[in-house]
């Protein structure tokens, strides 16, 4: 049963990764068009930038007051949180039931 739960949480992590891959690039394009100075602060490759991911995880997009950006970045943030938490839980379950 434990391995089943570990695999199920791994599937949740994969679905979170897919949602993140869909919404984060759209958020970055929106930032490029409307907030280029913020996007430049993320570095040369903002998709995997630690500063950009931290900005997303801490929901700092809400401080800009851009409702269109909120509609794109909120699902990306939730997907990233879902992926990270599900990977941690899956790893813990796998270690516990191994």
Image (cartoon, rainbow, N blue to C red):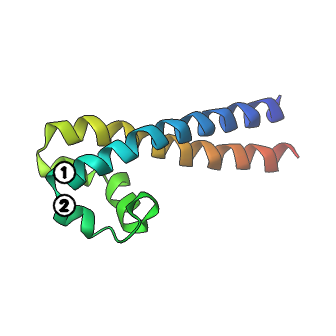
Mark 1: secondary structure: helix
Identify the image quadrant of the N terminus.
Answer: top right
The residue that mark 1 highlights is 33
Left or right: 90 as drawn, with respect to 18:
right
The percent coordinates of residue 30 (x first, y second) are 24, 46
The residue nearer to you, when weighing 63 against 3, is 63
> Dot 2, how many residues are within 10 Å of its Cα: few (below 14), some (14-19), or many (20+)?
few
Q: Residue at x 36, y 67 (%)?
A: 51
Q: Quadrant of residue 40?
A: bottom left
Q: Residue at x 68, y 38 (%)?
A: 10
Residue at the right extreme?
98
The residue that mark 2 highlights is 36
Q: CA distance from mark 1 to mark 2?
A: 6 Å
The percent coordinates of residue 94 (x first, y second) are 79, 45
Q: Quadrant of residue 65?
A: top left
The percent coordinates of residue 39 (x first, y second) are 26, 62
Left or right: 71 as drawn, with respect to 54:
left
Residue at the left extreme?
65
Whether residues under marks 1 and 2 lie with C-beta atoms below 8 angstroms apart, the answer is yes
The percent coordinates of residue 55 (x first, y second) are 32, 59
Left or right: 60 as drawn, with respect to 26:
left
Mark 2: secondary structure: helix
Q: Residue at x 46, y 61 (%)?
A: 48
């Amino acid at each position: 049963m434990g391995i089943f739960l570990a695999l199920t949480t791994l599937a949740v992590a994969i679905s979170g990764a897919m949602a993140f891959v869909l919404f984060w690039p759209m958020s970055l394009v929106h930032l490029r068009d409307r907030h280029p100075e913020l996007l430049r602060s993320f570095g040369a490759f903002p998709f995997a930038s630690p500063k950009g991911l931290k900005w997303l995880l801490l929901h700092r997009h809400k401080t800009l007051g851009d409702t269109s950006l909120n509609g794109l970045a909120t699902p990306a943030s939730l997907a990233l949180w879902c992926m990270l938490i599900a990977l941690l839980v899956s790893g813990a379950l796998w270690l516990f039931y191994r």
